[in-house]
Amino acid sequence: MDRIMPNRLDRGFYKYQKEFEDKALEVLRSGWYVLGREVENFEKEFASYTGAEYCVGLASGLDALWIAFRVLGIGPGDEVIVQGNTYIASVMGITINGATPVFVEPDEYFNIDTSKIEEKITEKTKAILVVHLYGQASDMTTVVDLCKKYNLRLVEDCAQAHGAKWNGRQVGTFGDIGCFSFYPSKNLGAFGDAGAVITNKKEIADDIRVFRNYGSEKRYYNKVVGANSRLDEIQAGFLRVRLSHLEELAEEKKKICERYSEELHNDKIILPEIREGATHIWHQYVIRTDCRDELIRYLDENGIGTIIHYPIPPHLSEAYGYLGLKKGSLPVTERYADTVLSIPLYNGMTDEEQDYVIRTINSF
């Protein structure tokens, strides 16, 4: 058997190869490559899929985040509450605008511990950024209640959670803005960088549409100092193909993860759990272990690749040294950073590959 990678994107391509290739030719032959019919149709289809009123395609997930806070008017002197164990892009969305991230520890499901949010709210708090990490929906009921109580903005980072639901409702639709990445490794992945926001508020959608195109509503008439953050026509076309198959792709990954949860038996590892009321779309299958280095080495020697999501939490990164947070300031976050490990998971993973991963981890 070939070496098993932590993720493989080629199989997801071959599964629908003809549809992707036909779409590429269709876009190339159209002669229209920026903000055309593919983007418009993808925006309609993705809004419809999520249950949101509006979708605006952007160049990346990070752009979705920082532009979201920009159009909400959040900047210097403002605080935004966010979980400590997220990918650093979530935090960058806040700090690019000059606002200050206020970190909250995660719960046992890797999402923000909603019981710890209220104690962090001050008169400077303007928003809560909820991250649906690894593909599992967060407890949105508590967060929505807190935002109402304190009159806070709510932004959702759904970069890893396309289609995940809390109590039957899709993530990204609970707050002011839902931010998505379509990086190739995501369940709804493009073939390059791509992102989008969803919202139920027309004025927010309109503002972001203007902002993404140099702040221009009409060519050469600029309302604001905007950005160049447009979803490419060709990527929008590819995303439309993948979106039409997203349910079956998600179901395939769910079955692999159900096998892992049922068949992995090793007292040295802790398996991920799903919160009642939440669905999980399994962007990653993340285990925890106190002997991570040994396990990584053992799996590597046996031809199995793994990834750590994420070894350095944002508050301890060099980039955020200026916040002055020292090791020990977020013990749960730091414990996760020292013990989490993502094992192989991808569309097109064979039964034989799954068997081998399970057998090898169980014999560690």
Image: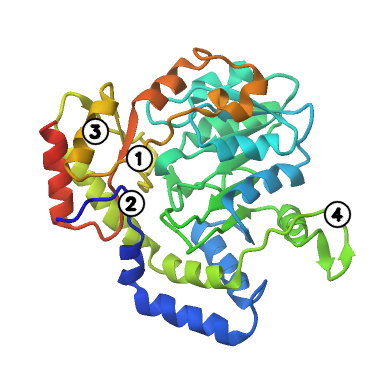
SS at badge 2: loop
User: Which residue carries the number 2 mark?
Assistant: 7
Q: Quadrant of residue 75?
A: top right
Task: Report whether residue 18 is seen.
Answer: yes
- Of discs 4 and 2, which sits in the foreground? 2
User: Which residue carries the number 1 mark?
Assistant: 307
How crowded pointer 2 is (Cα within 10 Å; few <14, some 14-19, many 20+) is rated as some
Residue at image position (55%, 51%) is: 180
Distance from the alpha carbon under mark 3 to that under mark 2:
18 Å
User: Which residue carries the number 4 mark?
Assistant: 224
Q: Which comes sooner in the sequence, label 3 or label 1?
A: 3
SS at badge 3: helix
SS at badge 4: loop
- Of discs 3 and 2, which sits in the foreground? 3
Q: Which comes sooner in the sequence, label 3 or label 2?
A: 2
Q: Which comes sooner in the sequence, label 2 or label 1?
A: 2
Badge 3 amino acid: Arg
Q: Which comes sooner in the sequence, label 4 or label 1?
A: 4
Badge 4 amino acid: Val
Distance from the alpha carbon under mark 4 to that under mark 2:
41 Å
* 283 relative to 66 in the view: left or right: left
Counting from the top left corner in percent of width and height, residue 337 is at 41, 26
Callouts 2 and 1 close, C-beta under 8 Å: yes
Image mark for residue 297: 3
Counting from the top left corner in percent of width and height, residue 193 is at 55, 58
* 347 relative to 40 in the view: left or right: left
How crowded pointer 4 is (Cα within 10 Å; few <14, some 14-19, many 20+) is rated as few
